[in-house]
Image: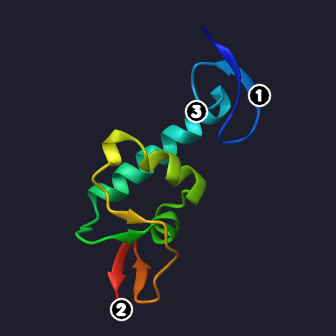
Amino acid sequence: MMEAKKCVRCGTMFISNNDVCDRCKNKDNADLFRLKGFMENQDIGEEIAQGELSIATGITNKNLSRFLGLDEFKDINVNSGEIDSLQEIKDGKIEIV
């Protein structure tokens, strides 16, 4: 049974079984595609700060937190820390400086 919900992305009230409204569904799909693409091109053997991942992908920390809870991203070692001054993002890749 469908119920009235508040979209976790934009806050609009809507009726559905999903967590996001129809308007935000496409935005979520685009962010997920960008996150998957980034992770495929990244050699992350160590832990990465969520702030760094947010900047590198352009996905907000709020939405990253939702996405990283999905089973397909369970193997990504992300901490909730901010950007580490020892790492820099260049050309979409995180590099130690």
63 in relation to 55, above or below: above
Q: Are marks 3 and 1 in contact (CB under 8 Å)?
A: no
59 in relation to 10, above or below: below
| Residue at point 40%, 74% (across, down) | 91
- Quadrant containing the N terminus is top right
Quarter location, residue 33: top left
Q: Secondary structure at mark 1?
A: strand
Which residue carries the number 2 mark?
97
Q: Secondary structure at mark 2?
A: loop
Identified by mark 2, the residue type is Val
Identified by mark 1, the residue type is Met
Which residue carries the number 3 mark?
25
Residues at marks 2 and 1, CA–CA distance in whole angstroms: 45 Å
Residue farthest along the top direction in this orientation? 1
Q: Secondary structure at mark 3?
A: helix
| Residue at point 36%, 58% (across, down) | 38
Quarter location, residue 96: bottom left
Mark number displayed over residue 76: none
**Disc on the earlier residue, 3 or 1:** 1
